[in-house]
Image (spheres, helix red, strand yellow):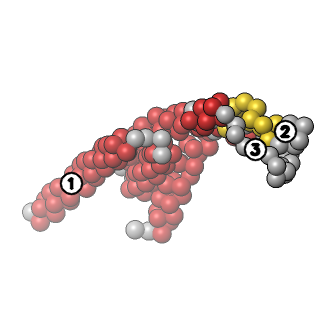
Amino acid sequence: MDTKKVALIIGLSILIPLFLFLFVDAIHSRPVYEDFCKYDLAFKPSPANCTYDYGADYESCLREGGSPNFSYDNNDCEVFNGCNFCNKEYTEASEKYDLIIFLILAPIGLLLIILGLYLRTDYLSSGAMFAGIITLFYSTIAYLSSMSKLLRALVIFVELIIILWIGHKKIGSSKKSSQKERKHKKK
């Protein structure tokens, strides 16, 4: 294959997914941790005579996924002062964002792969297919940590079957047409 075509394939396979990622992020931005959690980083070392029995509310806060807030008493000892769920809220917002990325970009990736099957120009076809695979890969990786173990395996399996089927259709049909062309040329 001509080096110019290879360069175009590489360019398309990088720039199309990059454009898609940036476009989706411009429309629906990733949550920012600081928008959820604002901490006062003022820290006082506690004297040695402090007791640290924070109580049942402290334990409940930890069990529910919160972050304990502290204040200081007259002796400069830490006192449990409520529970902050900002980290949990941020995690939930991030998981929702990753799901949206997956639900938008995975189908676009599959469409690019399918488009690559039907384009007649070989470098455009290859570029679209590579771009689709990269887009599908990125969207899956973005949401993978939020999936259950079984769902992870199922999603990867379905994507693998789709890629294998498309590859079989593309490569299988091109081999058959090449064989037919060779037989026709021999006659």
| Residue drawn at the location 25% of the way across and 55% of the way down | 171
Q: In the shown orientation, is residue 76 left or right of residue 26?
A: right
| Residue drawn at the location 60% of the way across and 32% of the way down | 60
| Residue drawn at the location 43% of the way across and 41% of the way down | 147
Q: Residue furthest front?
A: 49
Q: Say few, some or many: other residues with alpha carbon within 10 Å of mark 1 (under 14 / 14 to 19 / 20 or more).
A: few
For discs 3 and 1, the disc positioned in front in the rendered view: 3
Q: Say few, some or many: other residues with alpha carbon within 10 Å of mark 2 (under 14 / 14 to 19 / 20 or more).
A: some
State whether residue 93 appears in this view: no
Against 169, residue 10 (above or below) is: below
Looking at the image, which is closer to me, 10 or 58? 58
Q: Which residue corresponds to mark 1?
A: 172
Q: Quadrant of residue 54?
A: top right
Question: What x and y, as percent, mark residue 24?
Answer: 59, 37
Against 159, residue 55 (above or below) is: above
Q: Amino acid at mark 1?
A: Gly
Q: Amino acid at mark 3?
A: Thr
Q: Which residue corresponds to mark 2?
A: 72
Q: Which residue corresponds to mark 3?
A: 51
